[in-house]
Amino acid sequence: MRGIKKTEPLHSQVYTIVKEMILEGKYQPGERLVETKVAENIGVSRGTVREAFRMLTKDDMLVQDGNVLLVYNPTAQDILDLYECRKSLESLAARLAAHNITEEQLNELEQIIDESKEALIKNDKQKLTNLNQQFHDIIACASLNKQLIQLFEVIKTKVLYIRNCILKELMESFPDLVNDHIQIYSALKDRNPLKTEEKMGEHIQRSLKVANEALNKQMDLKKK
């Protein structure tokens, strides 16, 4: 957990700290967060934590249930809705990127793929998750569409959360997803907008299938 800095507003720092803890799975989906405990853990006042919680509630990372605040626990419908938006947005980003991507960005994507292959061999789940996000970030940036990039950032947090808290144990899905990245990269390198768009759409659809399978597996375990 990062430390507190005197140069930044406290509530913004606490917001970032708690958000990172949620994304890293240190707070579990559906877990209740209590102001006093979080304040004591970080070393700040309850009022500061309360303001940070308001910001997290606005981001939908915390959910109000009566007088209780719970960590966002996505349903199957939530995931479907998110990935439908993501499929449209990132497919468009991929098509635009095929026109605008630089050689430097292509080299970065190639490096990410190489590192992903190494992470597969080492069974490094967190590394694969981080590299996956970097891959998608570069393509969104390469679209050069400012509105698209802003919308991409809006859903990025929830996508990261789902990856870290729901998909992290499904190592068997990573080889297929890395192979998808190779095909997307190849289409980008060929400057083929339609193929890049198609391959990205297929990739997001595969990710949705994996997410739903993981969610269903979690639900089955809870019933036992």
Image (tube, rainbow, N blue to C red):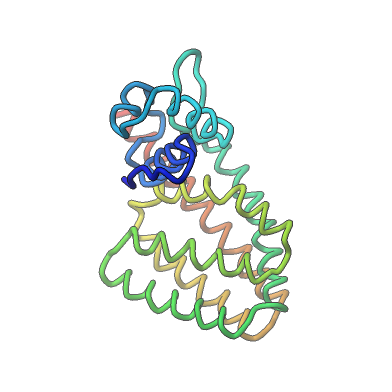
Can you give x and y, in whole percent of width and height, for residue 99 in the image?
72, 78
Q: Quadrant of residue 202?
A: bottom right
Q: Which one is in front, 164 or 182? A: 164
Tell me if residue 155 comes above or below residue 29 in the rendering: below
Q: Is residue 171 left or right of residue 54?
A: left
Q: Residue at x 36, y 30 (%)?
A: 44
Q: Residue at x 44, y 17 (%)?
A: 68
Q: Is residue 106 left or right of residue 14?
A: right
Q: Which one is in front, 175 or 95? A: 95
- Which residue occupies the extreme left position in the image? 122
Quarter of the picture containing the C terminus is: top left
Q: Is residue 219 left or right of residue 156?
A: left
Can you give x and y, in whole percent of width and height, for residue 119 in the image?
32, 70
Can you give x and y, in whole percent of width and height, for residue 158 in the image?
52, 45
Q: Residue at x 49, y 39 (%)?
A: 9
Q: Which one is in front, 109 or 87? A: 109
Q: Quadrant of residue 183?
A: bottom right
Tell me if residue 95 comes above or below residue 2 in the rendering: below
Q: Residue at x 71, y 69 (%)?
A: 144
- Which residue occupies the extreme top position in the image? 67
Quarter of the picture containing the N terminus is: top left
Tag count in the figure?
0
Q: Is residue 193 left or right of residue 223?
A: right
